[in-house]
Image (cartoon, rainbow, N blue to C red):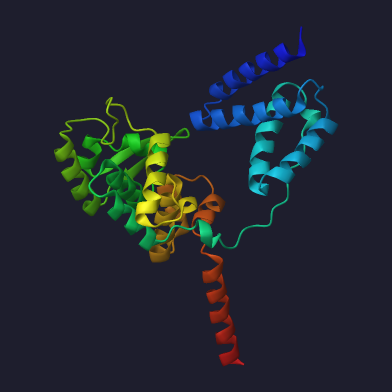
Amino acid sequence: MPEQFIKITAICSFEKYLISEEKSIATIKKYLYDIQCFVNFLADRQISKEEVIVYKEYLTQHYAPASVNSMLVALNCFLRFIGHGDCCVKLLKIQRQIFCREEKELTQKEYRRLVQAAGNTQLSYILQTICGTGIRVSELQYITVEAVLAGKAVVNCKNKTRIIFIPAPLQKILRKYIKRAGLQAGSVFVSTKGKPVDRSSIWRQMKRLCKKADVPEEKVYPHNLRHLFARIFYGIKKDIVRLADILGHSSINTTRLYTLETGHQHLNDLADVQQRILLIT
């Protein structure tokens, strides 16, 4: 049997395995993409530990450490699945982040400019919904007419079910949108074909908004609104456990990444500590 055919059948079998493990659609797509990258790199060569190590070095030269580890996790999973567990490689050791990159952090002022630039369009309401609840863009479909009227939505994501509360101010805003759009039931944010609007469409619309809002493109993507919600919530409540529940995280370590301040803020905090030390001594 040709080697290429074995690769194709193995990937198809791996996809079925991921589905049986109830992985999310996004996770399955990501894993399959990462595996295909390895297959393309391998070309007609046989799978071996040496080849995987060379591939790891290649990734290290072309991708950020976090991205490398993400791709290696998928590859290791695939290698174990096809019986090549002995070819798995170790992940890169990355020092725990203590602050986020300032050029990537969306500020409250920039968020407001985006909303204002979006005007009275559907995108404006989408921005306010994500930033007002902290939901994932893939969870927008659960914001239904019924949920808005009830003040809460039942979200099923990543094999977990949780309740998302819709704050009264956001309820008021969404009720106006629902009335204007003539919606009776189902998802609030739908395309012209009546289906829930997809993430790629939202992403493209947000990018087009950047110039008008005078916000750098690298800061504008749906997930950054979720990060902004997390930073504001944590800044007010200082309750990371409760925030983890709201965001639907299984690990506090994941939530911690959402609450990181910029390096500039980190320096200010260190300066405050130094000031107190000097006063004490």
The residue lying furthest to the front in this view is 211
**In the rendered image, is residue 161 in sight?**
no
**How many marks on residues?**
0
Q: Residue 110's x, y, as percent? A: 38, 59
Q: Quadrant of residue 206?
A: top left
Identify the image quadrant of the N terminus: top right
Q: Is residue 276 above or below residue 86?
A: below
Q: Quadrant of residue 191?
A: top left
State the residue at coordinates (74%, 45%).
61
The residue lying furthest to the right in this view is 50
Identify the image quadrant of the C terminus: bottom right
Q: Residue 240's x, y, as percent? A: 47, 58
Relative to 4, is 29 on the left or the right? left
**In the rendered image, is residue 186 in sight?**
yes
Q: Quadrant of residue 276?
A: bottom right
State the residue at coordinates (67%, 42%).
69
Return the residue nearer the eye: 202 or 184.
202
State the residue at coordinates (60%, 90%).
278
Q: Is residue 93 above or below residue 50?
A: below
Q: Residue 64's x, y, as percent? A: 66, 48
Relative to 137, is 74 on the left or the right? right
State the residue at coordinates (71%, 29%).
38
Q: Residue 258's x, y, as percent? A: 49, 55
